[in-house]
Amino acid sequence: VEQYLVRIDENRHLNAFTEVYATEARQQAEAIDQKLAAGTAGRLAGMVVGIKDVLSYTGHGVRAGSKILDNFTAQFTATAVQRLLDEDVIIIGRQNCDEFAMGSSNENSSFGPVLNAADTSRVPGGSSGGSAVAVQAGLCLASIGSDTGGSVRQPAAFCGVVGLKPTYGRISRWGLIAYASSFDCIGPIANTVDDAALLLEIMAGPDAFDSTVSSQPVSAYSQATLPDRPLRIAYLRDGIESSGVDPSIREATQAKIDALRKAGHTVEPVDISLIKYLLPTYYILTTAEASSNLSRFDGVRYGYRSLSNDTPALDLLSLYKKSRTEGFGAEVRKRILLGTFALSASYYDAYYTKAQQVRRLIRQEAEQLFEQYDFLLSPTTPTPAFRLGEKTGGSANDDPLQMYLADIFTVQANVVGYPAISIPAGTDANGLPIGIQLMAPPFAEEALVALARKM
Ligand code: GLN
């Protein structure tokens, strides 16, 4: 704990943590020392973790990177976090992220951006950017993030660490501040596949507080082994051939393909015919769900309330409007408006219903793919970490949609609800980390972590 506290202090400029629980972490460590002496310590004794600022931890602040949750204190603990605590994890602090987990660069946080420790002029990815950098820079041993469209895997790739998004419903979402409920997954970020697998194993499983959690038995992911036969692995042709993919990433992906072939596995290119509909489907449905989920932040129930004296709110509706306008950042407001539009009476069928139909087709295509293959391999991201400000749409020439393209390879797993992992695959010529993604069918986390570990 002391070592991590020193490192956190030395790396304040990275802005990875929004709050550090120094005193408490020391107390936790002492209590665990006693348990160790008594032989009653849990399976995670000694593991120092950080949690993304969207996970509730009773008595602690939780802000989702937003001003609208200013001074808000969680009144209960997320199931996933409680399960880690029950196994004697030490929580060293909460970690910076994009506001309400909306973003791919951690530039949408009311706490300011997080810097990539490999090159501080670059973004760490998002939305779990603080969580990835904390592991990358050795500020904690592992982090718990959330992944709605890539937010665990994409920052893990940009920071050279492991990020695991489980099957939808594998880990309870109780206590996770919702972005898009039918996509959101809690997932670990760690230095090794083994640690990620162990954290998954402990967080996963049924929970009376979340009716969408699966009752499928939780396997010993940390002990998982591969079936004793050649594997059938598909790789995304676009991940290698598309001109939008950085040459360094293409080479790293090709090297993994070659190594898998050499190990005796079948590795074949596939196309996802609906690939161009992935991002539109994702952004219509997630913004629709977000506009509904975020309606609870009204300036009355939680956190920030507009108290502006220049033009005080005169009625309840304007109190809501002023609090929400002042409390939410630009990206969150944009998504609430998009989602509200997609759900509005005149456009519901054209956008929301249509996107649901396309989502089903995308899922069918994935089901067919996984009838023939055990895994789908692709780059995690088309490029290594980009520069701060490069894709924020700040100047007239910038296209804000560029940012959304950073998620092209990660959103599919969330649209279909399948598990996927990003593992480090070296660096480019500038020393920027590269990540490779493996995806597996629902609840095939055992095989997924087993192959990831081998790779
Ligand atoms: N970058 C994606 C978005 O902005 C994914 C975010 C996430 O997974 N929470 O929505």
Image: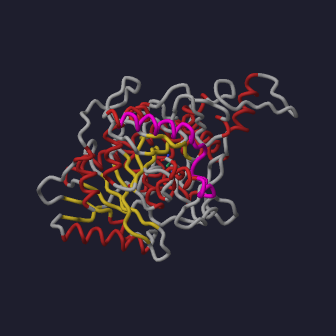
Q: Is residue 160 left or right of residue 331?
A: left
Residue reaching furthest to the front: 37
Task: Report if residue 13 lies within the magenta region.
Answer: yes
Residue 35 figure quarter: top left
Tell me if I can see residue 170 in this picture.
no
Residue segment shown in magenta: 9-36
Q: Main secondary structure of the magenta part?
A: helix
Residue 312 figure quarter: top right
Q: How many marks?
A: 0
93 or 426: nearer the viewer:
93
Residue reaching furthest to the right: 310
Tell me if I can see residue 258 in this picture.
yes
337 or 433: nearer the viewer:
433
- x, y percent for residue 56: 52, 33
Residue reaching furthest to the left: 228
- x, y percent for residue 279: 47, 52
Colour convention of the picture? secondary structure
Q: Is residue 255 left or right of residue 312?
A: left
- Residue 126 vs 243, above or below: the answer is above
398 or 342: nearer the viewer:
398
